[in-house]
Amino acid sequence: MVNRGKSDRKWKLRLLILLAFFSAGCSGQGEKPKDERFYEDDVTSEKEEYIVVGFAQIGSESDYRIANSASFRETFCEENGYYLLFEDGQQKQENQIKALRNFILQEVDYIVLDPVVETGWDEVLQEAKAAGIPVILSDRSVTVEDEGLYTCWVGSDFEEEGRKAGRWLEDYLKSEGREEEEIRLVTLQGTLGSSAQIGRMNGFAEVLRLHDRWNMLEYASGDFTQSKGQEVMARFLDTYPDIDVVISENDNMTFGAIEAIEEAGKTCGPKGEIIMISFDAVSEASFTAMKEGKLHADVECNPFLAPKVDEIIGRLERGETVEKIQYVEEQCFDAFMDLDAIMEQRKY
Ligand code: GYE
């Protein structure tokens, strides 16, 4: 790793401020420095000692994503010694690759990448490596030939999330005395090829394989958005009149699916006919859906990853080694728990 001294940083920050100044009005997405910075006389002031971090975010497709972006903006702030360049990829890999190339050009100190899909990153990560810029993966991960192309990854154990959903369904059907029944399932998948989609699907499939009577009718992607979730669910309902279980790979698709189910004159959740299982449990809306009896269970996915990334950067700055894979703690909630008490104790 290249040794990034403080004077080096000062030069880069000057360059960044200039770039931001000249591109003001046309970039739209980036974090812009406060006005007074442009007129800073004292170039040796502490403000120039920031660690510059380029964050290539996926988009703003879900409540998870909004909370995740907020986590980064809050943590990577001036008070904490950071200068954040935030790029929203609008769920397109090409935008994220472009963002990474810009970060390399601007000689940021660290790149944080939340990759929309797992494949197709080798080339740009090689460019970052050649430039001596450490890349930290956050939330989703990549599949690359050489694992040395990124420093580490921090995120959720998506396979375990999928298994949790499967085990929850297993226990629930048992508690209802339905273990011998034929169960017809459908899956609303997230963005195809993304770590969250692949992991959740594979984890759930491990449990699915243990049950001959569970029949997965179809997998189809709703791209993690509410509108597509609703659209795909409406089609599922048209195609299969007797769905018992919906596995929805995130809450926003679940909200869309609930709408589609109600529009079709059907019901879901403990108070209805169809068993609804979801992922994220980030927003109040997820808990409200469970409290209203429209959603059975929600496997938590923790979006507050920025403090972990901050900790990792701190270690790297001190020349310490970091673990290659770091998971965050998560639980599973269901409509039969004391959700008010859980929400009161929760930090988010
Ligand atoms: O579940 C979904 C979001 O990658 C874990 O992406 C994340 C997923 C999350 O859009 O809501």
Image (spheres, rainbow, N blue to C red):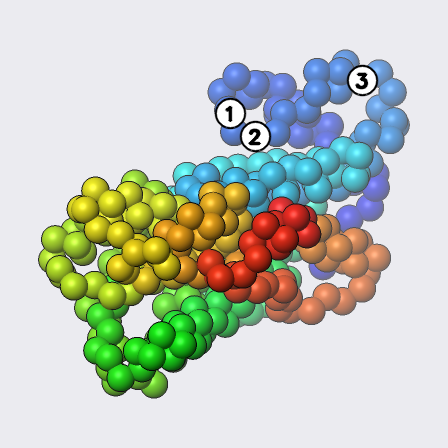
Query: Does residue 341 lie above or below 79 as drawn?
Result: below
Name the residue located 78 percent from the left edge and 48 percent from the top edge.
4
In-image side of 212 versus 174 (left or right): left
Q: Which residue is mark 3?
A: 40
- Which amino acid is tagged 2? Gly
On whether ligand 1 comes within 8 Å of the CB at mark 2, the answer is no
Disc 1, SS: loop
Disc 3 is placed on an element classified as: loop
Residue 64 in view here: no
Q: Which residue is mark 2?
A: 30
- Tell me the CA gap for discs 3 and 2: 20 Å
Asked if residue 15 lies left or right of residue 275, the reply is: right
Amino acid under label 1?
Ser
Q: Which quadrant holds residue 188? A: bottom left
Q: Could you say where residue 78 lies in the image, as x and y percent from the top left?
A: 76, 33
Q: Residue 73 shows which numbered tag?
A: none
Q: Residue 247, percent across and down?
A: 34, 62
Q: Amino acid at mark 3?
A: Glu
Crowd rating for badge 2 (residues with CA inside 10 Å; few <14, some 14–19, many 20+): some
* Percent coordinates x, y for residue 217 in the rendering: 19, 68
Please name which of the two marks, 3 or 2, marks the residue nearer to the observer.
2
Cα distance, mark 1 to mark 2?
6 Å
Confirm or reject: label 3 Cβ below 8 Å from ligand 1.
no
Please say if the residues under marks 1 and 2 sit with CB atoms less than 8 Å apart.
yes
Q: In front: 101, or 85?
A: 85
Q: Check disc 1: other Cα within 10 Å, few if <14, some if 14-19, many if 20+.
A: few
Residue drawn at point x = 72 percent, y = 36 percent: 77
- The residue at which mark 1 appears reads as 27
